[in-house]
Image (cartoon, helix red, strand yellow):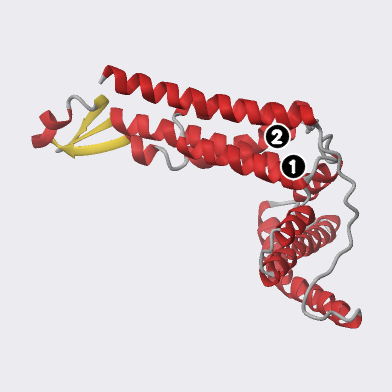
Amino acid sequence: MSLQLDTLAYTNRLRKLPPEHKLVFAFTALAISLATHPLVQILMALWMGVWTVIYARIPAGVYFRLLLFTIVFCLTSLPALMVNGVGIADLQSVQLDSWYGLTLGHFYIYISHSGSIQAWGILTRALASGSCLYFLMLTVPFTEILQTLCYLRFPALLTDLLLLMYRFIFILLNTANELWTAQNSRGGYITWRSGMKSLALLIGQLLQRTLQRYSQFSLGLEARGFMGEFRVWHPRRYRPQRRYIIEAICGCVGLIGLEIWRNAGIFTRI
């Protein structure tokens, strides 16, 4: 999956736009998502979906699988906010906050109204924030993000560490895929018992093989005269498009205006 995402980052339709423009747009949208109410967050998620799927031509199946991963991850923790419990003696104090409840022994377990509102707000914020980060991840190659950080005078040590971690992920995935293919070709996952044994062997060999490959990678850097800082040449063949710039600015201003209008309406009623 990581290899596919990296390939899409290099082949999407917005590839020729300057990466700093996409970074500024993504982080501006992320800031709006974190500071607004659920309606604006839902609109933000839909808008970023349009940018990712329609403008960048990212396959809808890949994008929605990523969003589904975010939703499932949130749903594992949201019930802790929605479900509450009190003793029978304190039942009257939660009657207004209870949507539905059951009496279990000396306790009353109920679905909290305020907790449900809080859970809904967290879910919409996670979707909006995730859609902004997915847009950045699917349209800007990681190396271009690092080059933009270098252009913004981020410390070279930080960008080099990020590049090494990024490389280490691919080494890990490639090693795991080779080990799994070798075990699968020998029938290592035919039965559940053999599968568990093969999985244990894979995990045991994965760290050793990965460290060996990473050592070879380090030796290769030293053989090429590595002086403590990665220097990669990259031609800046980007073409800013006024249409996307205007649409991004108008969309962000419109969402901020909607949030201000909503807050002004609330204060007027108060």
Label 1 element class: helix
Residue at the image point whose x is 73% and y is 35% from the top = 62
Q: Quadrant of residue 205?
A: bottom right
For the residues bearing labels 1 and 2, Cβ distance under 8 angstroms? yes
Decide if residue 60 is in sight here: no
Residue 88, given in percent of the width and then of the height, sits at: 12, 35
Which label is found at residue 63?
A: 2
x and y percent of residue 181 in the render? 83, 57
Report the front residue among 144 and 178. 144
Residue 177 position in % (x across, y down): 80, 57
Write the residue at 70% across / 65% down.
159
Name the residue rendered at 35%, 39% in the picture. Answer: 81
C-alpha span from label 1 to label 2: 9 Å
> As rendered, which of 43 and 120 lies closer to the eye?
43
For mark 2, give the secondary structure. Answer: helix
121 left or right of 184 in image? left
Decide: few, some or many residues near mark 2? Use Cα within 10 Å; few <14, some 14-19, many ≥20: some
Q: What residue do we see at 86% from left, 44% from top?
A: 238
In this rendering, the count of numbered labels is 2
Task: Establish if 30 lies above or below 160.
Answer: above
- Indicate left or right for 23 with 86 as reference: right
Image x and y of residue 46, in percent: 62, 25
Q: Amino acid at mark 2?
A: Tyr
Q: Amino acid at mark 1?
A: Leu
On the image, numbered disc 1 is attached to which residue? 138
Evaluate whether residue 21 shows in this view: yes
